[in-house]
Image (cartoon, rainbow, N blue to C red):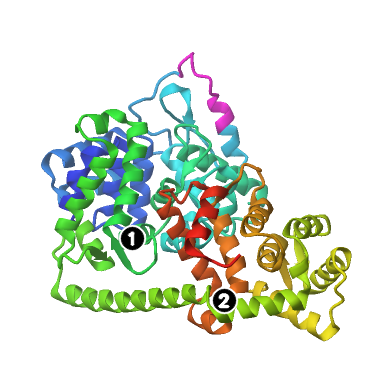
Amino acid sequence: MATFSKRLFESLSNLSEMSQYLVVINNVQGITEQEADALKELAFIQDIRFMAAHQSFIIDRNTNALVSNWRKLLAEVKNEPKRNKTRVSDGPPSPRSPSNPNRQSHRLSTLGIQSPTLDKEKGGEVHVTGNELILLRDKIGLGNLDPRTLIAKARGSLKNIKTLNFEDFAKFMTGVEGSGPDFNQLKKKQALKILFDNFDQEKKGDLDKNHVLNSLIVVCGGNPDAKSEATFMLYDVNGDGLISFDELLEHHTTVFRILHKVRPEAIDKTGETPESLARATVESIFNEADADGDGVLSLPEFQAWVKGEPISQAVKEEKKAHVEGTKGKRDKFYQQIKEAKKSLTSEDTVEELQKLKIGTGLGDVHVADALRYFKSHCATGYLTRKQFSEILLNLIHKYTDYRPESDVFNSAVNHLYVNFDRDGNGVVDSSELFCGLSMLCAGNAGDKLKGACDSYDESSDGKMQMAEVCKYFTSIFSVLLGNEAKNLVSPVHLATVTAKELFRQYEIEESGEISYEELKDWFDRNRVLL
C-alpha cells in the first residue's frame, strides 16, 4: 500500500508547484527509484497528464490512486514514440527574451546530451527540462551517488561556509566521478555550471549552502529513506545523531527566507514573517515527532514523522539510551574544556613560556620586527622544519646579541615545530606558526594581538572571520597548552569551542567578522597570556 505523510501534505501549500512535485515524488512510499526518476522527468517538462494526477491527489489525498495514475502514465509514456513531450507552456519564444535556447541546447549537446526541449521560465531565463536534468545528473555522476555520502562530505569541507559561488561548488563536487570515457574534466565543469545555474534561479552568483545541498539531495540517486536520512544529517549540525530545536529552526528559517525571496506571496498570505513561520513550523514538528518531549529528535523519530507513522516503544527506548550517552559525552567534553582553559593561566604555563622565550631568543625580539622578518623570508606561506630553524636563527642574530647553544635552541625549535605540524607531513602554515611565536616575542598584549591579526587580515580592515579566529586560537593554544592539557582536549577542539563562544558573546553571526578591538577586549577579560 502506498503512503504519504499527512504532515508533509499539510506543508505542500507553502511550496512552489515544482517543489510540491518533487516533495511528493521523493516521499511517497511504494514506488521504485526508477519510477521516481521517470516521474521527475515528467514533472520538469510539466507533462499535462502528470500535473492532472497531482491535482487529483491534492483534492482527494488518495495516495494509492496517485501511484496507480502515475503507473498508468509511465506505461503510456513507455509506449509513446520518442518525441517532444506535451507541456502547458509550449509555444513560440517571447520576442523580449534575452536568452537564446539554441545556445543552451548547444551547451548540452557538447556534453553528449541531446536537447529537444527547454524549460523557459519568466523573464526569459532558460533552464534544462526534466529529461535533460536526469541525463545531466547521470553524466556528472550524481545518479549513482548516495545523498548521505554527499552530506557527510559537506560536513567536513563546507563546515564553516554559509554561501557557495560556482567555483566553490565545482571544487566541492571534485571526486564525484562522471560517466563515460569521453567525459573529461572540462566537460564535467561545463555540466556543473549548467546545474549550478539551474539552482541559482535568482541569478545571484552566490547561493545559500543549505539550498545547494537540499537541491543535490533531490537530484541524487537513492530511495526515500536515504534522502530523509541525508536531510537529517543536514539538520544535525553538530553530528551527535540528534536534531535540536535550534538546529531545525536555523534550517527552516533559511528555507522560508529563500521561499520569501522567490515567492513572497506564499509567505505574505499567511500573515507571518519567514522567521515566525519557521518557528511555528518547527514547534509543530516537535509537538508531533518528539515523542518523549526531551527537546531533540532522533533519526527514527524524524523518519517516522516524514512517513506519518507512529513512534514505536523500541524507538523511544533506543533514543533515551542514545540521549543519555550523548549527554554524558558532552558533559565530559566540556569539563575537559574547562580544565584546559584553566591551565592557560597556570604557573606551569608561565614557566614553560619563559623557557621557550630563553631557548629561542625570541624574548628579546619585538613582535613587529619578527612579523616583518618572517613575511619577507617566507614567500610560499609554508615552512619546513629546516627553513623554520634557519629563519628563526637568522632573526635572532639580526635583532639580538643572543647566541643560543645548539642543543638548547634545537630542542626549543623541535618543541614548537611538532606542535604545529599536526598532520606530520613536515610542512606548516607560516601564518599559524608566526601567531604561535608571537606569544614568545617582546611587546605588550596589544602589539602581539595586532601582529597576529595583521598576519591573517588580508583586506587590512582590522577584522577576522570565524575560520581565521579558529586558526589563530589553534596557534596560541598549541604553544600555551601543556602535554597534560592536550591529553584532555586538542588545541583545534579548544580553539573551535572558544571561537564560537567569542562570537556568541559579542552577538556576531558565525558568518560575520570580529574586530581587533573586540578580540583584544576578550583577551583582557579572560586574562589569557599574551
Residue 347's x, y, as percent? 56, 79
Q: In terms of sequence position, does the residue under pointer 2 or pointer 1 come before the other? A: 1
Residue 317 placement, left or right of 220: left
The residue under the point 47% across, 60% down is 525
Q: Dividing the image into 4 quarters, which one contains the C terminus? A: bottom right
Residue 390 placement, left or right of 56: right
Q: Main secondary structure of the magenta part?
A: loop
Say if the magenta span includes residue 103. Answer: yes
Residue 301's x, y, as percent? 22, 65
Say if the magenta span includes residue 180. Answer: no
Q: Give the residue number, with chain letter if any, for mark 1.
A: 232
Instruction: Say which of marks 2 and 1 sits in front.
Output: 2
Secondary structure beneath label 1: helix
Secondary structure beneath label 2: loop
**Mark 1, residues whose alpha carbon is within 10 Å: few (<14), some, or many (≥20)?**
many
Q: Give the residue number, with chain letter if any, for mark 2.
A: 481
Outermost top residue: 95
The stretch in magenta equals 93-104
The residue under the point 40% across, 49% down is 507
The residue under the point 35% across, 74% down is 330
Three-letter amino acid code at the position of disc 2: Leu
